[in-house]
Amino acid sequence: MLLEEIMKGSLDLVILTKEVPSI
């Protein structure tokens, strides 16, 4: 469902922000 996709996307964003703190 959309909620699952959003949660997965948010997790990816969190990982990206952790890897690149400059963002």
Image: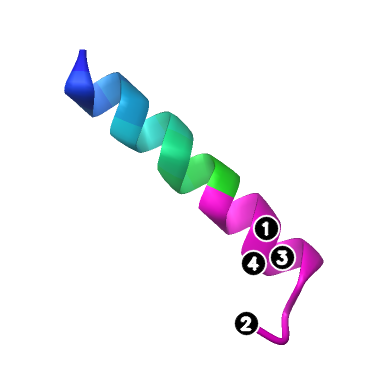
| Residue under numbered circle 3 | 18
- Determine the secondary structure under disc 3: helix
Question: How crowded is the residue under tag 2: few (<14 C-alpha within 10 Å), some, or many (20+)?
Answer: few
Q: CA distance from mark 3 to mark 1?
A: 5 Å
Q: Is residue 8 above or below residue 10?
A: above
| Residue under numbered circle 2 | 23
Query: Looking at the image, is mark 3 or mark 2 nearer the viewer?
Result: 2
| Range of residues picked out in magenta | 13-23
| Residue under numbered circle 1 | 16
Q: Residue reaching furthest left?
A: 2
- Determine the secondary structure under disc 4: helix
Question: Tag on residue 17?
Answer: 4
Q: Is residue 16 magenta?
A: yes
Question: How crowded is the residue under tag 3: few (<14 C-alpha within 10 Å), some, or many (20+)?
Answer: few
Residues marked 1 and 4 touching at CB (< 8 Å): yes
> Residue 4 appears at what percent x and percent y?
31, 21
Residues marked 3 and 1 touching at CB (< 8 Å): yes
Q: Amino acid at mark 3?
A: Lys
Residues marked 2 and 1 touching at CB (< 8 Å): yes
Instruction: For the C terminus, give its image quadrant.
Output: bottom right
Q: CA distance from mark 3 to mark 2?
A: 9 Å
Q: Amino acid at mark 2?
A: Ile
Residues marked 4 and 2 touching at CB (< 8 Å): yes
Residues marked 3 and 4 touching at CB (< 8 Å): yes
Query: Looking at the image, is mark 3 or mark 1 nearer the viewer?
Result: 1
Q: CA distance from mark 1 to mark 4?
A: 4 Å
